[in-house]
Amino acid sequence: MTGITVTLRALHHGERDLERELMAAADRHRTDHEFHHVATDVARWSHEHAARLADVARHRGLELSAPPDDPSPAALGALGEKGAEALGGRPEPGLLLLHDLRHLHLAAVSNSLYWEMLAQAAQATRDERLLGLATSCHPRTLRQMRWTNTMLKEVSPQLLTST
């Protein structure tokens, strides 16, 4: 197994996790319509990234399972319970939103680093397929990061000073 295949596997896992976490957060905050809809939209990007990674990996002899069409409601519920447990039971909705945004942001940052590493390896090996994948997917991951960062900046002052 090469460093590229290890990175493909890690990034595929990270994109699938980010998709599930975005969908779970969208479900937990469904009354915040803007958050719910944007989180659902950017989760689709991670879904597409995982599918494209699986396709490129297959051409390199690595089998990565394709993401399921939709996360199951049971899985979303379990993720919601984990988030609540991490904050000590049933947190205030605002604090849960901050927790979710922080977690989503860090997951997107991790994926971004893998995309950057993959792009650098693709350039070094002159792998046009891999470079094309990283070039087309990484900007969306950067947008996921900017969205979570912007949301954190917008909601943190009020939520942290009012509790």
Image (spheres, rainbow, N blue to C red):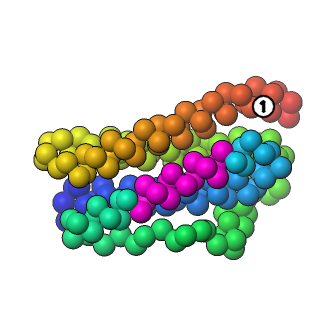
Q: Residue at x 78, y 53 (%)?
A: 30
Q: Is residue 3 above or below residue 1?
A: above
Mark yes or no: residue 100 visible: no
Q: Position of residue 129 (x, y in %)?
A: 23, 52
For the stretch drawn in magenta, what is the main secondary structure? helix
- Indicate left or right for 55 with 3 as reference: right
Q: Tell me which corner region of the image, top left, top right, bottom left or bottom right, holds residue 76.
A: bottom right
Q: Position of residue 24 (x, y in %)?
A: 67, 59
Quadrant assignment for the N terminus: bottom left
Residue 148, quarter of the rendered image: top right
- The answer to which of 36 and 29 lies nearer the viewer is 36
Tell me residue 65's x, y (percent): 40, 72
- In the rendered structure, the answer to whether residue 38 lies left or right of residue 48 reads right
Give neighbour class at mark 1: few <14, some 14-19, many 20+ (Cα, 10 Å): few
Query: Which amino acid does the dot numbered 1 rest on?
Result: Leu
Q: Residue 142: horizontal and vertical position, in percent? A: 47, 37
Secondary element type, mark 1: helix
For residue 23: magenta?
Answer: no
Farthest residue to the right: give it. 162
- The count of marks equals 1
Q: Does residue 59 appear left or right of residue 98 in this picture?
A: left
Residue at image location 43% in from the left, 70% down from the top? 66
Identity of the residue drawn at 43% across and 60% down: 50
Instruction: Identify residue for label 1.
Output: 160
Q: Is residue 29 visible?
A: yes
Q: Which residues are magenta?
A: 38-51
* Quarter placement of the C terminus: top right
Above or below, 8 relative to 100: below
Q: Considering only vertical position in the picture, is 149 above or below 62?
A: above
Residue at image point 28% right, 61% down: 56
In magenta stretch: residue 46: yes
